Amino acid sequence: MTQKLFTLGPVEMFEYTRERPLGPLPYFRTEAFSKINLECAARLKRLANAPGDSHVLLLACSGTGAMEAVVGGCFSENDRLAVIDGGGFGHRFAELAAHHGIPYEAVKLAFGETLGGDALAAAASASPGGGFAGLLINHHETSTGQLYDLDMASGFCSSHDLYLVCDAISSFLADGLDFSAQCIDALIVSSQKALALPPGLSAVILSDRLWEKIGREKIRPFSLYFDLTGAELDARRGQTPFTPAGGLILALRDRLERIEEEGGYGAAVTRVSALARDFRARIAGLIEKGLLGLPGHPLSNACTPLVFPGGGAKAVCEKLAGEHDVWLNPCGGELADKVLRVGHLGALAEADNEMLAGLLSKILWKA
């Protein structure tokens, strides 16, 4: 059997990306390559519905690198942040704030616990010394599969005059999102999720409001490589301060062009949503028999977290990989033997769902 990735990054790439000949990479300090960067930035803005005065930075790093660029580059020890810590990636935001010496209040959620407005209100009332400067949230907490209510988070930020930082690494092109309507100030995207490209390229879209904060408060770059001011100056002319991920940028241009040709952001979300619904329908019998379960929190289209009531998630994951070359995302910590995550991103089809659901049924009925 050919390898099949139901993981959440990297994901199955589309045929036109896989077959794209690498060829000789172009020299990047040219007007021609600048036009490619500027085209990618413009298309990302359109897909996210970001305003014309927003700032797009293409970074040669993983999603975590982009998260750190925003946390350490837009805030300082004079700020205080609210962090939604509902899993591994929310906790990463907390770790980044702590690493850069930025005071923060964590809103902790247990697996299956839904983020509600009461938790945000409690955090606001518990914040000493005059409240928060910003809210850090993973639109989709990838480690648990929970899709947070971004409209609620946006309303909270608007009512408390906070900057809204949204990690959309897993949700971009998979779940509904609107930079302008939801008053997002920093949107973080990475190449290996619904963009279905190899890892190593991230994009950050900053509102002009947040960009002005950096200059007004003279926030010092925490590193030369992640100097956002320098990166933005170069981005205006379609360049990056240091060597870009040239091959990935070329693939990004092709992928963004194809997404827009196929109907844009809404069409991409519709496709992923249909795959998620189809898979969940195919495992309904296993859920009814108590062999699998789903958590009680809202789910992203990007991922279905499979709960194993009696444990055994590790063995199932290993069996699928070792005997069938089918790869799911395991969990860590206390969820390691209780939860597996099935991704619905990239070049998957209903036939792939049928195959995986059939394998799960065979394995679990024999257990």
Image: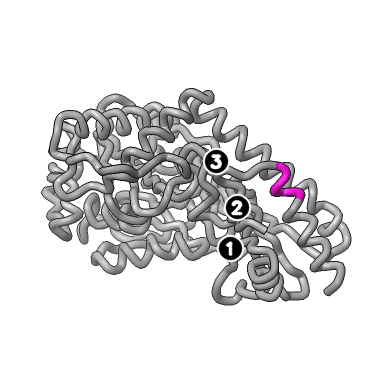
Identify the mark at residue 256; answer none if there is no mark.
none
Q: Which of 119 and 168 is in front in this view?
A: 168
User: Do labels 2 and 1 touch, CB within 8 Å?
Assistant: yes
The image's mark for residue 343 is 2
Within the image, what quadrant is residue 23 found in? top left
Q: Is mark 2 on a helix, strand or loop?
A: strand
Residue 225 position, x and y percent, is: 17, 56
The answer to which of marks 2 and 3 sits earlier in the sequence is: 3
- Point out which mark residue 174 bears: 3
Q: Please state which amino acid type lies under the numbered disc 2.
A: Gly
Whether residue 316 is situated above or below residue 257 in the rendered picture? below
Is residue 163 in view from this perspective?
no
Residue where numbered disc 1 is placed: 329
How many C-alpha atoms fall within 10 Å of the one at disc 2: few (<14), some, or many (≥20)?
A: many
Instruction: Decide which of tag 2 and tag 1 comes sooner along the chain.
Output: 1
- Mark 3 crowd level (few <14, some 14–19, many ≥20, 10 Å Cα): many
Residue at 55% over, 72% down: 332
Nearer to us in this view, 278 or 125:
278
Amino acid type of disc 1? Answer: Asn
Classify mark 3: helix, strand or loop.
loop
Q: What stretch is highlighted in magenta?
A: 350-354
Nearer to us: label 2 or label 3: 2
Residue at 58% of width from left, 68% of height from top? 331
Of tags 3 and 1, the one toward the viewer is: 1
